[in-house]
């Protein structure tokens, strides 16, 4: 406890002391109160010395705080400058990546269109071949359906 706390304790003791009836006086335990006040008196020079040391070092503390604040402000300015530079770099990178994506999408669309055209032409060719094959199959089936058994056997013998 420091001297302030001791004095506060003495005040609390007086405030909570039993009052003397019909009087503004109170009853306190003399030895306890004297002990608390004596401890406070003994602590006061030490507390005053600490306070004087604090007052003496106040200017050094204020100067140190000022220097620290100046350093923080300088660091903050450097950080802001770095962040602004990074922001412009990041924006340029975003623009470049968007340009590359747009070019890639356009190229992919052109290639997709070319592939679809190639597949369509191949399917059209296959369709023509299949139609001719279907016609040949149909003619062959018609021949078979129109020929009697002898013609089929004689045609097989020829082949």
Image (cartoon, rainbow, N blue to C red):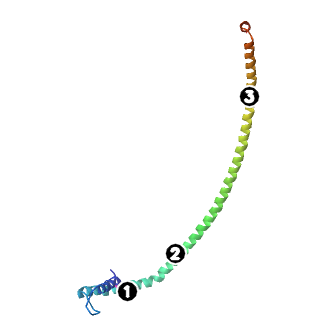
Q: Is residue 16 left or right of residue 84?
A: left
Residue 99 percent location from the top left of the image: 70, 53
Where does the N terminus fall, quadrant-wise? bottom left
Magenta span covers which residues?
Answer: 45-49
Which of the numbered marks, if any, corresponds to residue 127?
Answer: 3
Residue under numbered circle 1: 48
Residue 141: % across, % down = 72, 16
Q: Is residue 81 above or below residue 98?
A: below
Q: Secondary structure at mark 3?
A: helix
Q: Residue at x 68, y 50 (%)?
A: 101
User: Which part of the image, by quadrant, shows the C terminus?
Assistant: top right
**Picture residue at 74% right of the left edge, 28% below the top:** 127
Count numbered badges in the picture: 3
The label nearer to you, 3 versus 2, is: 3
Q: Which mark is residue 101?
A: none
Q: Is residue 48 magenta?
A: yes
- Say few, some or many: other residues with alpha carbon within 10 Å of mark 2 (under 14 / 14 to 19 / 20 or more): few
Q: Categorize mark 1 by other alpha carbons within 10 Å: few (<14), some (14-19), many (20+).
A: few
133 and 19: which is toward the camera: 19
Q: Which residue is mark 2?
A: 68
């Amino acid at each position: 406890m420091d001297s302030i706390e001791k004095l506060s304790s003495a005040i609390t003791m007086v405030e909570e002391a039993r009052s003397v009836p019909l009087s503004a006086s109170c009853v306190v335990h003399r030895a306890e109160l004297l002990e608390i006040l004596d401890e406070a008196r003994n602590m006061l020079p030490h507390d005053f010395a600490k306070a004087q040391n604090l007052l003496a070092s106040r200017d050094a503390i204020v100067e140190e705080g000022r220097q620290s604040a100046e350093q923080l402000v300088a660091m903050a300015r450097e950080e802001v400058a770095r962040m602004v530079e990074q922001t412009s770099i990041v924006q340029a990178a975003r623009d470049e990546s968007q340009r590359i994506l747009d070019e890639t999408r356009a190229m992919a669309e052109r290639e997709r269109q070319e592939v679809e055209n190639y597949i369509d032409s191949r399917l059209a060719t296959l369709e023509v071949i299949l139609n001719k094959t279907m016609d040949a199959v149909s003619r062959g089936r018609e021949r078979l359906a129109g020929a009697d058994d002898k013609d089929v056997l004689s045609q097989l013998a020829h082949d």
